[in-house]
Image: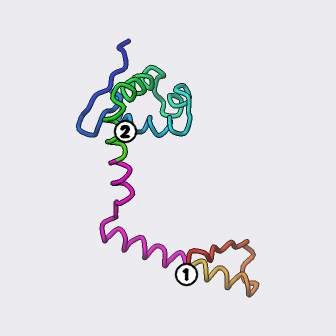
Amino acid sequence: MQPAAIINRGRGPEIEGTRITVYTIMDYLEMGWHHTQIAADLDISSAQVQAAVDYIEGHREEVAAAYERILEQSANAKNPPWVEEARERGRQKRLALQEEILQAKLHGLCDVPVIVDRTKR
């Protein structure tokens, strides 16, 4: 059995043979997970998780800086206009259906329990 390795195929350091980056492992570590729990959740070996942990510890500043950039980009990411339009159309359909069900329920035309979240209007 080969030792677990960390490679970089252009997406950042990741566990060889997977698409799991060290940043994913960092997320679990930040939540306080033990390496055996991480391994079980991601369906990889404890040795692979430990290789990522060792890499993170050995490259702490570099990994932390890249991780912060990723989080910042993610926070500022926007969907393309066509995706936002589709999301809005779906939202409008959902709201109309919720209103229709609510009215049916109020008029005794529907026996289905209805939960309408009016905080999102």
The residue carrying mark 2 is 64
85 within the magenta span: yes
Q: Which residues are magenta?
A: 69-96
Above or below for 67 versus 34? below
- Horizontally, residue 102 falls left or right of residue 33, namely right
Q: Where is residue 15 drawn, in percent x and y?
A: 36, 29
Q: Nearer the viewer, residue 42 or 53?
A: 53
How many marks can you see? 2
Between disc 2 and disc 1, the foreground one is 2
Give me the residue at 42% from left, 38% from top: 24
Which residue, as the protein is rendered here, is positioned at the far bottom?
A: 107
The residue carrying mark 1 is 96
**Quarter of the image containing the C terminus?**
bottom right
- Residue type, numbered disc 2: Ala
Judge whether residue 40 can be spotted in this image.
yes
- Horizontally, residue 3 falls left or right of residue 115, namely left
Q: Nearer the viewer, residue 86 or 65?
A: 65
**Label 1's element?**
helix
Give me the residue at 67% from left, 85% from top: 103
What secondary structure is the stretch in magenta mostly built from?
Answer: helix
Give me the residue at 70% from left, 73% from top: 114
Q: Where is residue 30 drawn, in percent x and y?
A: 51, 38
